[in-house]
Each structure stands twice: as C-alpha cells, then as structure tokens.
Image (cartoon, rainbow, N blue to C red):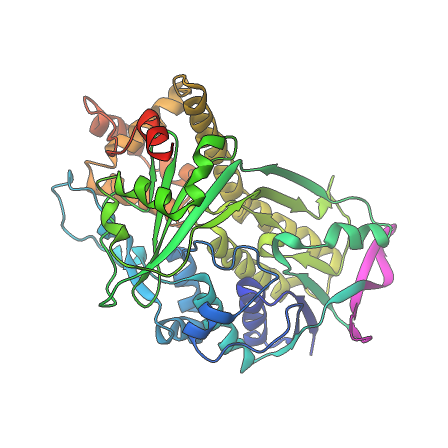
Amino acid sequence: MPEIVVIGGGVVGLSAALMLARAGHDVTVLERDDGAVPGSPEEAWQVWPRRGVAQFRQAHFLHPAGYHLLDQMLPEVAQALLQAGATPFDVLSLMPPFITDRAPRAGDERFATVTGRRPVIEYAVAATADERLDIRRGVTVTELVTGPAVVKGVPHVTGVRTSDGGELPADLVIDAMGRRSGLPRWLAELGAQPLEEQAEDSGFTYYTRYFRSAGGQQPQFITGLLTPFGCFSLLTLPGDAGTWSVSVYISSRDQALKELRHPARWAALVAACPLHAHLLDGEPLTDVLAMSGIVDRRRRLVVNDVPVVTGLVTVGDSACCTNPSLGRGITMGLLHAAGTVEVIGKHLGAPLTLAAEHDQMTQTRMIPWYQATVEFDRARRAQLDAAIEGRAAPQPAGPAAALQRAFGIAMLHDADIFRAMMEIITMQATPAEVFARPGFAGRVMAAAEGREAFGPPGPSRAELLGMLA
C-alpha cells in the first residue's frame, strides 16, 4: 500500500489526509502542535492553543464551494460540523431589497453552506480524523530524506526525519504546513534550485470582535458580508452556536485609525454604521483582536517546466495563501486538496509526471482565485490610501473596468445577475467563466443603465477622526 506523509494537521492537511485514506492510501500526519484535540467545540474555542495557526481566532468563513466539497468527498466531516453546532447559512439571504423577483431558481441549493468559528471547524475535522488516521502530534520534521534522483540534478524526496529521532519513508510527502511552511529552507539544504515565489503584504490591518446572542440565533446580515466604506471596510461573518464576528479593516498605513484597537472606539465606529449597528447587540466574547502583516503569496515547484523537487507537493496555504477579507482561505485549501488527491490517484508511481500534473492542476484551479484576490486587494488598498491622503479614489478606465462597475450595480437589481455575483463570491465560478456566458455582459450593462452604485450609510473620514480623537 503506498505510504504518504502529510506535514501539517490543520483543516486542509487533515482533509487531504482523510481523502487519501478514503482512496486506499496509508497516510501518516505529522502535526507540530502538541496536545490532544479538545473534548468539545466550546473547549476548542476557549482553550485550544494551536500556536501553529496565526489566524486561529480571527474571522473565518466556509464558502458553499468548500462545504459542498466536504459533503461530497468527506460526508462524515460535514456531519461532524453540524454536530459541533456549525450554522447553516444561505448567501441568497443577502439578496438586496431592490430586487423584486424573489422566486427561487433550480440549483439554488448550491448557495447554502454550513460555517462556524475556525476553532470549531478545525475541531470537527480533527475529531473525525483522530478516529481514522495515524496523527502524531507534537512531532516536527527536521529535514527531508532523499533517494536516487528521477531527474538529473533534481532532489527526489523519499521520506522525512522527525524531531523524535525517527525516520519515515514515503512514496510522497505533502507540505500542508500553511503560511509558516519552511519548505524553501529545506529545499535549499538539499541543494535544490529555488522555487518560484510571488509575495506581497496585503497592506491591511484587521480589528475583530466576536459576539454571541442570548437566544442562539444569528443576526441579520443586511448589506452583505463585506461592506466597503470610504476609509475602512466591515467584514461580518456568521459563526456557530449563535456567534458571529465583526471585523473592521483599514490600510496599515492609516495610523489615525489604529485607535480602533480600543473596544469603546471600535464599537463607536460600528454603531455609526446604521445597517451594521445591530451587530453589537450580543454578548462580546473577545476583546478587539488585532492582526496585520498578512501576505498574499504563491509558491511554485515547477520552474521553466522543470520541477525543483520530486516526491513532494504542496497543498493549501503552503502553495497559495491570501488575506482573509474575502474569506477564501479554507475553501481554496479544500479545493486544492481535492485536486491533489485526484492527481495522486493517477500518477503516484510516476514522480516526474506527478510533479508536472500537480503544478498544472494548481495553475488551473487555484491561481485564478489567487490572482483575483491580489487584484482585489490592490484596488481596495489604493482606495483606502486615497482616503488617507484626502484625494478621490482612483477609477480604472477602459471597457473591462466599466463592465465591472456595471456588474456591481446590476447585481443590486437583477436576481440572476445577483446569483452570478454570488457564484463568484462563493467560489463556484471565476469572473472569467461568468462573463464568458452568452449574453451575460449585455444583460449586465442593460440592468445597470441609468442606475447608481449603492453607498451604505456610515461616517465620513472627518466624522470618524472626530469620534476617535
């Protein structure tokens, strides 16, 4: 039976390992954080340290694309999420009031998900995995083991050495170590050529608080989950067991708004946004949780059509990570894990082919989402920086930019265009796929004609600075 070592026991690493085990592989998971999985979802939220996951208690969301993948490929995990108190949520509930056509459509079930706080999602995955996998917690990898090369000059990984003095042979090693993966250093120690890397700071600082309702119900999310204002954005996400999160995010350059780290000033901002103020009507579960320095980064193990290593692939954030404002991280990782399992099933016995096919799968399935997120981040950062400097926000020119602006207007008034936007937001279709549909661009332009973009009510920059003074 082929042996596979997965380095990293987070949501994506464990999900990949569970999928591989279902496919008949012998899988061992190495997780650097020690300690057993907590005994309950609430204990996971309260006391699970998970020092290896920097964003463990920051805002998270499981998009419908991610949930439906779990429901199809790992139904036991989908069931465990519900048992852990995760919340069913239908993004069609966010349909704007300007849309009069509220009739359901065939296939609307694709917009439903089940989501929760990151510790609870991870608890459901880890508790399921503990029953089915060999998971060695508190064990780190100290170096990669290599054997005879299959390509001249390219290291071929055949296992790992671990912090407990052991050595694990493997037909394949999977790096699921997330944002903190030390893979570049390990490859350098093997004498491998440098991998290809693109990285940039997203340029945002996040201030997040969690709340819980007394009756266990979710609040109404009126304007959508992500709402931009002049010099800040609000990210509001449903959680599990009657919880939700509210994140204010700003440009990391905006020193004046860093007063939002104080709970009273943070609450004053949210209260000044009429369509969001009701989200303060709950029991605060946390102080203001600050986070910055989040990098959008992709790594590629095939450079100029030649792998830098064989016998090893990356999955999830180790390969491609984005900032959390669009909530794509877990879902991107799950989609990548499923694609990785598919490639392994076809090519495990052919290391060179596996490396090439895994790279191609990543470029096809993941990089469009990465690029779209980076472009979104750059555009939003430019808007926020313009607000700091007191100048008008930049307006991209050209037909593509005009069509994109029209899309944002048309989705407020046309039920089917709204669904198309939700397909993109929930990661079920890329923008390119949506706009390639016959007649879609024309329908967007027609629906937007004569209408203006909706600006949610909230404080101006001057008013906000006065509140924070």
| Residue 75 seen in this snapshot | no
Left/right of residue 294 with respect to residue 157 in the rendered view: left
The picture places residue 192, in percent across and down from the top left corner, at 83, 49
Q: Is residue 79 above or below residue 117?
A: below
Residue 347 or 418: which is nearer the viewer? 418
Q: Is residue 426 above or below residue 68?
A: above
Instruction: Write down the region rendered in magenta.
Output: 144-168
Instruction: Pick the quarter of the image with the C terminus.
Output: top left
Instruction: Report the magenta stretch's main SS.
Output: strand
> Residue 167 is drawn in which quadrant?
bottom right
Q: Is residue 114 above or below residue 226?
A: below
Residue 333 or 229: which is nearer the viewer? 229
The picture places residue 311, in percent across and down from the top left corner, at 75, 61
> Residue 262 is drawn in which quadrant?
top left
Question: Which residue shows up at 65% across the image and 54% down it?
Answer: 180
Residue 317 or 265: which is nearer the viewer? 265
Q: Is residue 138 above or below residue 198?
A: below
Left/right of residue 74 with respect to residue 283 in the rendered view: right
Q: Going by the picture, which residue comes out furthest to the bottom? A: 131
Question: Which residue shows up at 71% across the image and 64% down it?
Answer: 173
